[in-house]
Each structure stands twice: as C-alpha cells, then as structure tokens.
Image: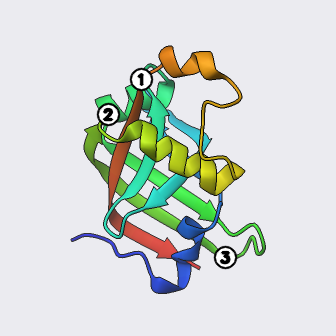
Amino acid sequence: MAGRIPQSHLDLFERPVVVGLVTLMPNGQPQATPVWCSYDGTHVLVNTARGRQKDFNMQRNDRVTVLAIDPDNPYRWLEVRGKVAAITEEGAVDHINALSKKYRGDDDYYRANPELRHQETRVIYKIAPLKVNAR
C-alpha cells in the first residue's frame, strides 16, 4: 500500500527545504545526503548527476528514505520511506533548473559553472512513498 503525503506537510516539498536522502551503501551502511527535491503529487523527485554515490546506491538498491525537517520548527517533520519507481534522464536538466529556481532563485543551475553542463549527465529518481510519518 502506498503512503500518502499529508496535506498538512505538503509545504515541506513546496518550499525550498533541503531534505535528507538516505540510501544504502553496498555493505548495508546507510548513507545520508542533503538534496533538493520536489513532489509531483505521486512521487518525490530527486535530481542528481550520474556517478555520484547516491546514484550508484539507488541503482543497486531501490529502498530510500527522505526526511524533511521544517526549518521554522524542528519538531515538525516528514519522513517518506519509499522505493525508486523510475529513473530517467529525460527532462532532468529542466528539473534541476526548476529546483535551482526554487532553492536559489536562479533558473539556470549551470550559470555559476557553465562548463559543468557538458561534464555531467543529470538524472531524476522518482521515489514512490510506501510509508509516511509526519509530526
């Protein structure tokens, strides 16, 4: 059964709240990374570059957790335990640009480092919520 993001906590995905993404290393050790994300009404979307540790981890093991803590009230949080439902490069540059607009106010993620645009391949991980906890 899929978890549902409560209406009361949707703002944690709508506002520029940096979330913790927890993936599993090959030896089972959890690995946490602060990331930008969005929510499309069904999936939590995380954008990364190919070759990063979280990319390797999510390709190998689709179980992940996303933790969003309200920066205005650390006792208000949302945990999404889920599985990677899809991995796509399609639209990934547009998505990172949208995230850059949301988090930095700049709709060009590569503006500060233009050569990086040709050095990396962006990818979107679509995470299906399986269990959701909120306080």
How far is mark 1 from mark 2, CA to CA?
A: 8 Å
For marks 3 and 2, the one nearer the N-term is 3
Outermost residue, right side: 72
Q: Residue at point 56% right, 58% down?
A: 67
**SS label for mark 2:** loop
Mark 1 and mark 3 in contact? Answer it, CB < 8 Å.
Answer: no
The residue to which callout 1 is attached is: 121
For marks 1 and 3, the one nearer the N-term is 3
Q: Amino acid at mark 2?
A: Glu
Q: Residue at point 57% right, 75% down?
A: 11
Q: Amino acid at mark 3?
A: Arg
How far is mark 1 from mark 3, CA to CA?
A: 35 Å
- Nearest the viewer among 4 and 48 is 48
Q: Nearer the viewer, mark 1 or mark 3?
A: 1
Percent position of residue 130, x then y: 31, 64
Outermost residue, left side: 1
Percent position of residue 101, x then y: 62, 52
Percent position of residue 105, x then y: 69, 53
Which image quarter holds the N terminus? bottom left
Q: Which mark is residue 89?
A: 2
Relative to 98, residue 96 above or below: above
**SS label for mark 3:** loop
Q: Residue at point 39% right, 39% down?
A: 92
Percent position of residue 28, x then y: 42, 32
Outermost residue, bottom side: 8
**Is residue 110 in view from this perspective?**
yes
How far is mark 3 from mark 2, CA to CA?
A: 33 Å
Q: Residues within 10 Å of mark 1 (few under 14, many from 20)?
A: some
Q: Amino acid at mark 1?
A: Thr
The residue to which callout 3 is attached is: 76
- Nearest the viewer among 81 and 48 is 48
